[in-house]
Image (cartoon, rainbow, N blue to C red):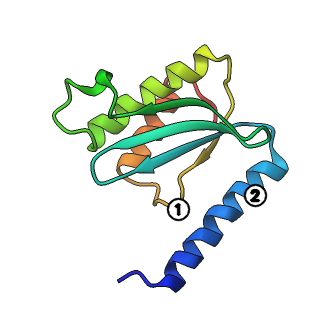
Amino acid sequence: MITSRDRLAQKRKLNRIRHKNKKNSNRPRLLFCKSNRYLSAQLIDDREGVTLVYCSTIESDFSSLSSKKDLKAAKVLGKLISDRIKNKGIKEIFFDRRGYIYHGRVKEFVVAARENGLIF
């Protein structure tokens, strides 16, 4: 059972990661999110407070996949968002895993994005 104390600790961790990026880097932040049904990723410029690129498994590019939240979907999402980021002319980014463990879908997403030429 997740208590309010656990949620507060998780929120502090997320704020700490976001603050480190905002303070020490000029690179945009690649945010990866998981829900019970879909995966999504967005590239955020924290200095301006705007979303530069967004991609989700809800889009029609993922209609051929049987599941929109498994490892294969994470890999396709990583390739697709890295292509969109490269089209914007951005090569170096800061990856924000939002407290998720670097394993499974998160790892597949990052590996696919790195294979397509993004520098973390």
Q: Earlier in the sequence, mark 1 or mark 2?
A: 2
The C terminus, quarter of image: top right
Residue type indicated by callout 2: His
Front one among 106 and 56: 56
Q: How many C-alpha atoms fall within 10 Å of the one at disc 1: few (<14), some, or many (≥20)?
A: few
Identify the mark at residue 32; answer none if there is no mark. Answer: none
Tell me what residue is drawn at x 43 percent, y 24 percent.
80
Asked whether, in this view, residue 65 is left or right of residue 38, the answer is left
Q: Amino acid at mark 1?
A: Gly
Counting labels gives 2
Which residue shows up at 27% across the image and 35% down it?
72
**Residue that numbered label 1 is attached to:** 99
| Residue 19 badge | 2
* Residue situated in front as seen by the camera: 82 or 50: 50
In the image, residue 56 lies at what x, y percent? 40, 34
Q: Position of residue 101 (x, y in %)?
A: 46, 60
Vertical side of 100 occupied by 63: above or below: above
- For residue 66, which quarter of the picture? top left
Where residue 46 appears, x then y in whole percent?
Answer: 73, 43
Residue at x-position 34% and y-position 34%: 57
Q: 110 or 40: nearer the eye?
A: 40
Horizontally, is 41 left or right of 103 in the view?
right
- In the rendered image, the quadrant that contains the N terminus is bottom left
Identify the secondary structure beneath mark 1.
loop
Q: In the shown orientation, is residue 78 left or right of residue 51?
A: left
Residue 69 in which image quadrant:
top left
Which residue is depicted at the point 78% across and 37% down? 48
